Image: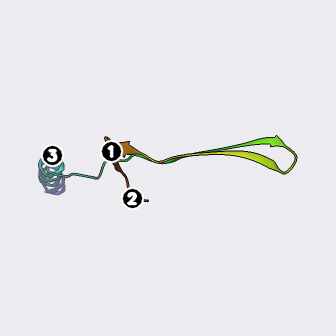
Amino acid sequence: MNWLVRALMTVILTSLAGHASADELRPGYLDLRERAQDEFIVLWKIPALGDLRQAL
């Protein structure tokens, strides 16, 4: 009986997994480089899709 419950749960969860959705992950990019002592170069890139930028 226990194997039947596991088999049914596997079928149910597998069928529901196709309907799951998530947000697209587009992380920002931060680059810090030390140019000299106490002097840094900072590069910050924000993900964009065309002219639209992702809100952070």
Earlier sequence position, callout 1 versus callout 3: 3
Query: Label 3: which residue?
Result: 18
Query: Label 1: which residue?
Result: 51
C-alpha span from label 2 to label 3 = 28 Å
The crowd level at tag 3 (other Cα within 10 Å; few <14, some 14-19, many 20+) is few
Q: Are marks 1 and 2 in contact (CB under 8 Å)?
A: no
C-alpha span from label 1 to label 2 = 13 Å
Label drawn at residue 39: none
| Residue at point 84%, 51% (across, down) | 38
Three-letter amino acid code at disc 2? Answer: Ala
Which residue sits furthest right?
Answer: 37
The crowd level at tag 2 (other Cα within 10 Å; few <14, some 14-19, many 20+) is few
| Residue at point 17%, 52% (across, down) | 13
Q: Please tell me whether mark 1 or mark 3 is closer to you in this view.
A: 1
Label drawn at residue 55: 2
Three-letter amino acid code at disc 3? Answer: Gly
